Amino acid sequence: MSTTIDVTAESFDQTVSEGIVLLDFWAAWCGPCRSFAPVFEAAAAANPDITFGKVDTEAQRELAAAFEIRSIPTLVAIRDRTIVFAQPGALPAPALADLVAQVRALDMDAVRAQSGAA
């Protein structure tokens, strides 16, 4: 059973409505995307309280355009409806685990204050 969900333009708002969400923007033809998929699945299994979503950039072109995806795979972390990380490239498992820990540890009041002050 998959521990990730497919995210579409129609399901996006509900998916990111609360908590921590990691999105993997990918395509079936992308070799690095296929290599990253088991790492992403393993992280999802290890963190059941976080939503791990996959966005097929071929099927969800509008969603990919909204996030200005230029390279895949691209990983986006959203916490409390705020993008807190976005970076292209496949992460190795230890780096993804570190990212999850950093997103969990964020002081979202400080993040909101900083983004409001910009």
Image (spheres, helix red, strand yellow):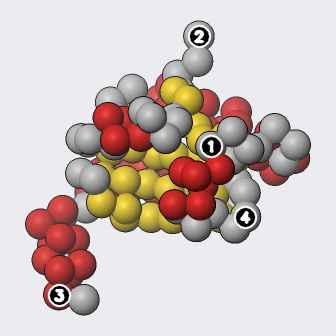
Image quadrant in which you'd find residue 16: top left
Earlier residue among tags 1 and 4:
1
Lateral position of residue 38 relative to residue 111, left or right: right
Lateral position of residue 78 relative to residue 70, left or right: left
Image depth: mark 2 or mark 1 in front? 1
For label 2, the crowd category at 10 Å Cα-Cα, with few meaning under 14, some 14 to 19 and many 20 or more, is few
Image quadrant in which you'd find residue 59: top right
Q: Secondary structure at mark 1?
A: loop
Residue occupied by mark 3 = 117
Residue occupied by mark 1 = 60
Image x and y of residue 90, in percent: 70, 55
For residue 92, say whether it is visible.
no
Report, in whole angstroms, how far the alpha carbon at label 2 lies from the one at label 1. Answer: 23 Å
Q: Looking at the image, which is closer to me, 55 or 34?
A: 55
Q: Amino acid at mark 3?
A: Ala
Residue occupied by mark 4 = 71
Report, in whole angstroms, how far the alpha carbon at label 3 lies from the one at label 1. Answer: 33 Å
Image x and y of residue 103, in percent: 35, 56
Q: Amino acid at mark 1?
A: Gln
In the depicted structure, whether residue 28 falls above or below residue 80: above
Q: Secondary structure at mark 2?
A: loop
